[in-house]
Image (spheres, rainbow, N blue to C red):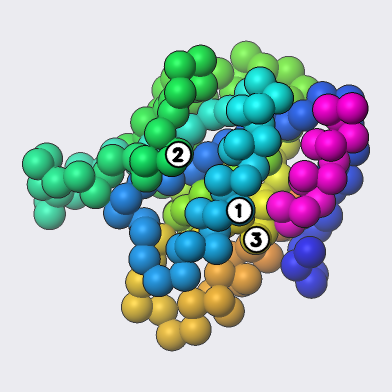
Amino acid sequence: MIAGGDVTPLRHEDPPILVCADLQIEYLGEGADAVTSRCGVLLSLWRENLWPVLHLKRIAQAAWFNPASNLTDWIEQFRPRPGEMVFEHPLPSAYSSTRFAEYMSSMKNIRCAVVGFSLDETILSTAIEGFHRGHRYQIIADAVACGGTGIGDAEVYRLSMVRAAGNLAGVADSGELIEAAASIAV
């Protein structure tokens, strides 16, 4: 658990939707191994239990964007499977995808556990917009990473982003989510 972060209980009858944010090649870099490992464990658990999985993919068209590049491709082990929802979003917030905004608005009383990359863009901005729309998100603190590079102390920056998101969403770690999921699966 992150000190100072809001912790929302994970014990519920139904599992949350697992939201895999921007698990794309372009975000792989130094320190990504631990996050991708935790994301992989959670994604495997959700898939084994046939629980809902939602994938977010950032498709920004910046001036430097090269359509021949594979940077926006999925990391192979996180490639969506048939039956898993996929939403492409051009701006940082996933709500910039009309389909995503409509989907979330049509769902009642759902909870979303968020893992992946782009904590300082996609995850934070989606949590902010979701909060204002009355949607419930839980950031899995040890399964998220910032997409930016060149930051002085990357871990301090990541923790500050988790704390910022925790003002508008719950915060937990992957162990707590796995424990709660085990009680649901039984």
**In x, y percent, where is residue 28?**
37, 59
Q: Do the residues bearing badges 3 and 1 touch, measured as CB atoms within 8 Å? A: yes
Calculate the distance from the C-alpha at mark 2 to the C-alpha at mark 1: 12 Å
Instruction: Say which mark, if any, is on residue 142.
Output: 3
Horizontal arrangement in the rendering, residue 47 relative to residue 1 (left or right): left
Q: Which residue is mark 2?
A: 78
**In x, y percent, where is residue 162?**
64, 62
**Circle 2: element type:** helix
**In x, y percent, where is residue 64?**
12, 54
Q: Amino acid at mark 3?
A: Asp
**Circle 3: element type:** strand
**Circle 1: element type:** helix
N-term mark: 3 or 1: 1
Q: Name which residue lies at 40% across and 34% down.
A: 79
Q: Which residue is mark 1?
A: 38
Q: Which residues are magenta?
A: 171-186
Q: Is residue 53 above or below residue 113?
A: above
Instruction: Say which mark, if any, is on residue 94.
Output: none
Displayed quadrant of residue 135: top right
* Mark 2, other Cα within 10 Å: few <14 / some 14–19 / many ≥20: some
Q: Amino acid at mark 2?
A: Phe
Q: Is residue 4 found inside the magenta-colored segment of the image?
A: no
